[in-house]
Amino acid sequence: MVAPKPPSASRLGRMWTLSEQFPPIPMILVGILTFLALDWSLQGLAGGDQELVLSWRVIPGGLSVTLLAFILRVYDELKDADNDRRLAAAGDTRYMDRPIVTGAITEGDLQTARWLTSGALLLCGISLGLKALVVFFAVYFVFWLSFKWYFWPKIQQSLFLALVTHNPLTLVVELYVVAMFWVLAPVPGPAWALGLLLLGLWLPLTAWETSRKIRLPEMETDYETYSKIFGWKGAAIVPAVLVLISLGCLVGFSLAAKIPGSGGPVLYAFLGLGALVAVGGALRLLLKPTPAATKLRPFMEAYSFATQAGLCVAWGVARGVSLQTGALPWDPTLWSF
């Protein structure tokens, strides 16, 4: 094992170690892509043949999505600090190099990162108007509850309970983006089509989460994994099934939205290729179980990217894109219900 680098003398330098797990530029791009996939899909679902609107709002919108994901990362580091040290002391090689274990970052640094991120999120909410700000406080409150394990200590000892209580936070972020759309226009129906869209974009991240903690029997340690819950074969099947359900939801949404022209085939191409990669990764593990094959995370990330990029490209091809300034933060229309 390579000896860890000495911790930075500055708090900012120590906080920067989080960029190893949360690289800022790629994650900001993912946040913007997530925002656009939902915003343009809502514009498309509203009907009409006008071009899609791309305004300054994509910046605070995409940044807020990224910051919400980042604050969850910080929360996880704080909540898991003692457990990470315990697993490292027990000899789990996956935890010996964790920043909180090596001292590259401290709980105090993480608390600073937490409050700085909270402040940046508040600024994003303010810039988007009253409705978005109200929803921001609701979302932030739910996230804060997750930091306290929803005041149910049993969640901390159960990976399955953590999954079913924390994974829906991704859906909460999607609803936040819907609220940003609601600031300017009524959310279009039918409600079931919007539900398919939200579910179709949420499930890939659930697949990603369940794919991160799979080990073969000989690889297991004291660390709780999904392979301990479902068995290693079941743990390989779960994310693949979630991907296929997501695929069905997004195809159903595209039919309801009636994406014009070649937009539909473009979306199906993205979804089909992404699903093939994700399910192929799971089948690889089932057919040839090796330690390398248990690393399903990149395959699920590929499908998640395909869903978001596919929606953006499909709507862009179908309707075109118009750059507009739109209502600015001080516009009175943004500050009324």
Image: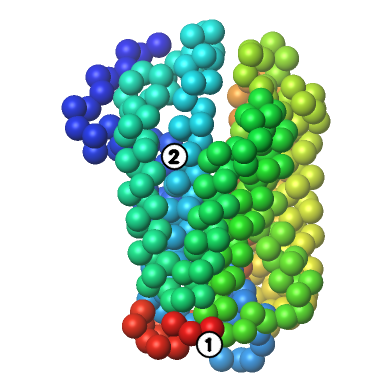
Amino acid at dot 2: Val
Residue 15 placement, left or right of 318? left
Looking at the image, is mark 2 or mark 1 earlier in the sequence? 1
Q: Quadrant of residue 44?
A: bottom right
- For residue 62, say whether it is visible: yes
> In the image shown, does 282 or 61 lie closer to the viewer?
61
Name the side, left or right, on which 71 lies relative to 328.
Answer: right
| Three-letter code, disc 1 | Glu
Disc 2 designates what residue? 74
Q: Residue sitting at 76 percent across and 79 percent down?
A: 190
Say which residue label 1 marks.
51
Q: Position of residue 238 (x, y in %)?
A: 77, 38
Tell me residue 255's x, y (percent). Answer: 77, 75
Q: How far apart are labels 2 and 1 at the CA level?
A: 39 Å
10 Å crowding of disc 1: few (<14), some (14-19), many (20+): some
Residue lying farthest to the top in this orientation? 90
Q: Position of residue 219 (x, y in %)?
A: 65, 14
User: Which residue is farthest left?
Assistant: 9
User: How far across and how far down the image is residue 15, in percent?
Assistant: 31, 36
